[in-house]
Image (tube, rainbow, N blue to C red):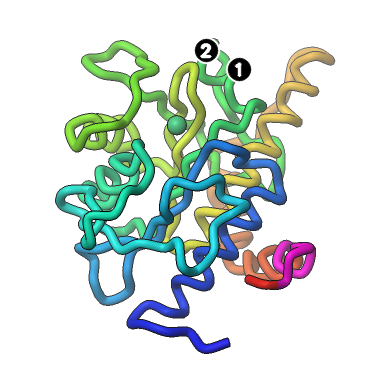
Amino acid sequence: MTDAGPFGTEFAELVTANRILAARGVVDGWGHVSVRAPGRPDRFLLARPLAPALVTRGDVLELDVATGESITGENTYLERHIHSGIYRARPDVAAVVHSHAPDLIPFTVTDTQLLPLLHASAFLGEGAPGFEVGGVPTGKLIDTPEAGDELATSLGTAPLVLMRWHGVSVVGESLRQAVYRAVYATENARIQLQSLALGPVTYQPPDEARTVAATVDGVIDRVWDLWLHELSDTSV
Ligand code: MN
């Protein structure tokens, strides 16, 4: 199949990212993933408002980072401002995943920090910030550019931000890294909940986590290739 258009390769990889996130249970009827357009830091790619498992190449739209609106005026997700707000604030970010994964919700509604328990999730480091407005945790929808800016402020320089009663938004320096982090943040949450049920938990020390995360970042492609292989729908 030919990769048509200026961002054909990225269209295809974004469809794959949607399928992987759905297959891993990180997104269901909710959630979305975007990638910044290569060579056009003022643009990003995001699908029409579909469940990620149903996204095809023809559903991918080009959006304006400044406004969060599609270039052609076509409709996309209500919470597209998660993506545009973060891209405005973080030039280092090349991709964003937004998820409502249930295993992460307990960490949005309690004081228990999401902390690394796996080498694979060492990027969690010293924990994830929560979405706050004026110092108060909030569950508001990110349906305006202003709310996108507020979310990006809470995210700061972290790899993810936890959103009360809602979910998580995860960033990466590449699409693969953002997808990887979204999957393993969710996996870590599941294991942390299991561990907390057994008793006091020993977390990965931040200095060790930093070293491990840097090493793991170099081999993400191996995991991506497996997830791609496991997709039952080979039409991507
Ligand atoms: Mn949401």
Instruction: Kindly identify the residue that appears in the image at 63 percent across and 41 percent down.
Output: 26
Q: Which residues are magenta?
A: 227-234
Q: How many marks?
A: 2
Question: Which residue position is annotated with label 2?
Answer: 109
Instruction: Tell me: 32 left or right of 46.
Output: right
Instruction: Kindly identify the residue that appears in the image at 74 percent across and 65 percent down.
Output: 233
Q: Which numbered dot is residue 106?
A: 1
Question: SS of the residue at dot 2?
Answer: helix
Q: Position of residue 61 (x, y in %)?
A: 35, 62
Q: Amino acid at mark 1?
A: Pro
Which residue is more in the foreground, 82 or 156?
A: 82
Q: Position of residue 31 (x, y in %)?
A: 51, 40
Mark 1 beta carbon near ligand 1 (under 8 Å): no
Residue 207 position (above or below residue 47): above
Q: State the residue lying farthest toward the right.
A: 198
Question: SS of the residue at dot 1?
Answer: helix
Labels 2 & 1 near each other (Cβ < 8 A): yes
Q: Amino acid at mark 2?
A: Val
Q: Which numbered dot is residue 73?
A: none
